[in-house]
Image (cartoon, rainbow, N blue to C red):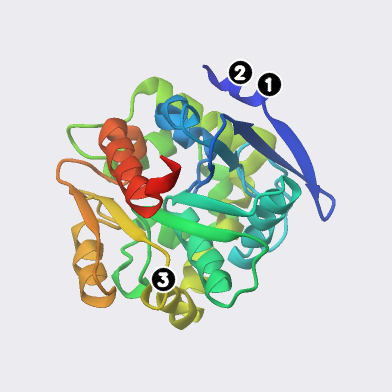
């Protein structure tokens, strides 16, 4: 499947007047896949077909990302969580597994916090986390992220182009698993769609939200009875080996799969390893379903 086919076989739903792109495919237990910053649901393409053989896979481009609306407004993890929950509720989902990456990890942590409070309309059966800023004290943003968050962010976004993106992706992918030219083209197409690069500095406010809500979001992992697994690319300069070390310190009975030669995008760089890890954890979490 190519990117155009991915779009053409998707749908849109309305969230507060904004059109949100989503895709649902496969049959079986529901599985929600939540992408990271600054890319989109296409991030899951390398494991999508294998997952749809076993699950009803549900994914979306969150507000400000990919093919969804990109309004010039403030963005919040809480709103993105509301959007994910609305999609699941519209589809009548009563229970689901979750796979998340990067920015999506923080959305998943908020979903988990609500699950712990019994305020969701559905049950979370398992959560598989990929590289992300789970703990603000261990998050190591690259220079571009720092600049986007600064007062220069609004000016900087006008200068971002595919070459800028490629340079930054090569910094965060593993040295032996670099992004291909096609992958860079696809990432840039999704970021640039509807002038999305012009809201990148607004979306990156999640870095502030992580600090402000650390107790809630770290606590969601520490206090939950939902089966958790972290599958982490260890060579990621943003959320690599140092996050794994902190995860083991803070999360009871930490279940971690370390991908030694992989960077920030394990589902792109080492899809089979991610697939094996995720399927194993889901099977452990719900053996009766599989």
Categorize mark 3 by other alpha carbons within 10 Å: few (<14), some (14-19), many (20+).
some
**Image disc number at residue 64:** none
| Residue 133: % across, % down | 38, 63
Categorize mark 2 by other alpha carbons within 10 Å: few (<14), some (14-19), many (20+).
few
Whether residue 190 sits left or right of residue 105 in the image: it is right
* Closer to us: 205 or 149: 205
Residue to which mark 1 is pinned = 8
> Where does the C terminus fall, quadrant-wise?
top left
**Image disc number at residue 225:** 3
Q: Do the residues bearing badges 3 and 1 touch, measured as CB atoms within 8 Å?
A: no
Categorize mark 1 by other alpha carbons within 10 Å: few (<14), some (14-19), many (20+).
few
* Closer to us: 276 or 4: 276
Q: Is residue 78 above or below residue 172?
A: below
Q: Quadrant of residue 218?
A: bottom left
| Residue 113: % across, % down | 52, 73
Residue to which mark 2 is pinned = 5
Q: Residue furthest front?
A: 288
Q: Do the residues bearing badges 2 and 1 touch, measured as CB atoms within 8 Å?
A: yes
Q: CA distance from mark 3 to mark 1?
A: 38 Å
């Amino acid at each position: 499947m190519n990117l155009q086919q991915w779009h053409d076989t998707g749908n849109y739903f309305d969230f507060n007047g904004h059109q949100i792109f989503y895709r649902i495919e496969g049959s079986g237990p529901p599985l929600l896949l939540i992408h990271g910053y600054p890319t989109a649901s296409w991030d899951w393409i390398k494991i999508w077909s294998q997952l749809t053989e076993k699950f009803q896979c549900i994914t979306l481009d969150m507000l400000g990302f990919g093919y969804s609306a990109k309004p010039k407004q403030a963005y919040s993890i809480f709103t993105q969580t509301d959007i994910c929950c609305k999609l699941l509720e519209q589809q009548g989902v009563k229970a689901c597994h979750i796979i998340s990456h990067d920015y999506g990890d923080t959305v998943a942590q908020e979903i988990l916090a609500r699950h712990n409070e019994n305020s969701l309309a559905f049950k979370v059966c398992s959560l598989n986390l990929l590289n992300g800023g789970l703990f603000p004290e261990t998050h190591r943003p690259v220079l571009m992220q720092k600049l986007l968050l600064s007062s220069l962010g609004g000016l900087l976004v006008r200068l971002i182009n595919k070459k800028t993106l490629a340079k930054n992706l090569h910094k965060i992918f593993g040295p032996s698993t670099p992004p291909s030219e096609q992958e860079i083209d696809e990432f840039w197409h999704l970021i640039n769609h509807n002038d999305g690069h012009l809201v990148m500095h607004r979306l990156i406010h999640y870095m502030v939200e992580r600090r402000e809500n650390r107790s809630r979001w770290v606590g969601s992992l520490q206090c939950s009875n939902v089966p958790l697994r972290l599958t982490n690319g260890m060579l990621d300069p943003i959320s690599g080996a140092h996050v794994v070390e902190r995860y083991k310190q803070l999360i009871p009975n930490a279940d971690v799969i370390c991908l030694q030669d992989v960077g920030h995008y394990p589902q792109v760089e080492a899809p089979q390893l991610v697939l094996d890890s995720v399927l194993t954890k889901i099977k452990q979490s719900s053996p009766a379903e599989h």
